[in-house]
Amino acid sequence: MSTTDEHPGSSGSDVAGPTHGGPDDDHTPAQLAAMDRTELDRLGARYDGVEILHVEPGPLPGSGLEKQATRQVTMWFALAAFFAVAFLVVYAGSGWFLPGWEWEVGADAWSALFTPLLGLAMGLSLLCIGIGLVQYVKKLLPHETAVQDKHDGSHFDRVTTGATLMSGLDKSGLPRRKLLLGTLGVMGAAFGAMLIAPLGGLIKNPNTGNPLGTTSWAEGVRLLRDDGTPIRPGDQQPGSLETVFPAVEGGNRQADAATMLIRLRPEQQFSEEPREGQADFSYGDYVAYSKICTHAGCPVSLYEQETGRILCPCHQSQFQVTQGAKPVFGPATRPLPQLPITVDDEGYFVARSDYIEAVGPTYWNRERI
């Protein structure tokens, strides 16, 4: 009797039939992506290691409880939109967001209220959004407790996850709650506008030009005391210091324009040659230097008339007046900028120009002297 060698896998009762590796092997990614959650469930999605422990359905559609919860959530989202619009209105009042439209309020009042109002409006908008989301999740969404073992996801798992999310959107009832959906759209638009509105400052940027290198001092601008009165030669005693500001709007509130007008004592003489281009910056025995320390921007307000030294109380830098306000002690490395001064036809001190160098501390493109 002849025998025939059977090749493994040919035919025979002990040979296993064809096996399948699961939905990923039986279907293409495009086919899986086209299926809804029900079809995916039939392929085993509902048994993919997920165990439903507890289900608490949301309020019945059309019930009084659902309508009440929907109104509450809609109210919070509407308030969020209102405060976002309020932010835009306040910001527009600065004239940056909509050039030419500015609130008719005093400069001092607006300066004091502008930033707090912006922060209050944005904070309330965010708070209302948070409360609305919490109310929506607690009162309108069905609650489901489930556990799933961690494993490496396949394409089938990813498609199932996407379908589950879409199914959750349908179960949330949001698509059929038109008023709430419309309020969300308005809130999203207002909130988005609130976030991008600060970019409107680029339309009307007050810091154009060279704000770090210039101040309000200019040719012919009078030197005023803090009370707004002008000053003449002879008004100060020898060895005294007077803080002066430019005679422009808000001059005594411009920190970078604060200047020390110093009258030297008769025995005090300049011990060094003035720096280049600054030989005629003084007027008689009067000199004017920036009040802003060149180390960290602190106000240098202490003056020792006997030694002719200006002291910064913050970090103890000292500047010698008779040496062009050169630093002689402490961390400062640059002299205080000198303001060129003269007198006008009425005999009052005026500036001959702005400072020829930037006031304040050294920054990235400023050389040390």
Image (tube, rainbow, N blue to C red):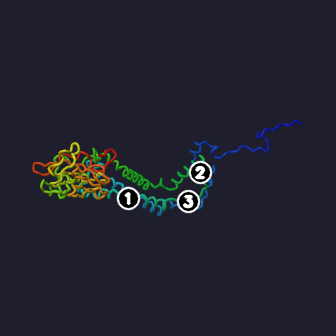
Task: Give how far apart the Cα atoms at labels 1 and 3 are.
Answer: 32 Å
Foreground tag (2 vs 1): 1
Residue 152 image position (x, y, % from top left): 61, 50
**Crowding at label 3, few (<14), some or many (≥20) Cα neighbours within 10 Å?**
few
**Residue at the extreme top of the image, as rendered:** 2
- The residue positioned farthest toward the left in the image shown: 346
Q: Do residues under tags 2 and 3 come within 8 Å of each other at their CB atoms?
A: no
**Which residue shows up at 23% across the image and 50% down it?**
323
Q: Amino acid at mark 3?
A: Glu
Q: Residue flagged by tag 1: what amino acid is it?
A: Gly
Q: Which residue is mark 2?
A: 38
What type is the residue that disc 2 sits on?
Thr
Pinpoint residue 222: horizontal percent, then vertical percent: 16, 51
Q: Residue 265: where, in percent of width, then height?
A: 16, 55
Label 3 sits on residue? 144
Q: Specify whether residue 226 is in view.
A: yes
Report crowding for label 1: few under 14, some 14 to 19, many 20 or more residues within 10 A (C-alpha): some
Which of 310 and 3 lies nearest the eye of the viewer? 310
For mark 1, what is the residue? 123
Helix, strand or loop under label 2? helix
Calculate the distance from the C-alpha at mark 2 to the C-alpha at mark 3: 18 Å
Determine if residue 78 is in view: no
Marks 2/1: CA–CA distance: 43 Å
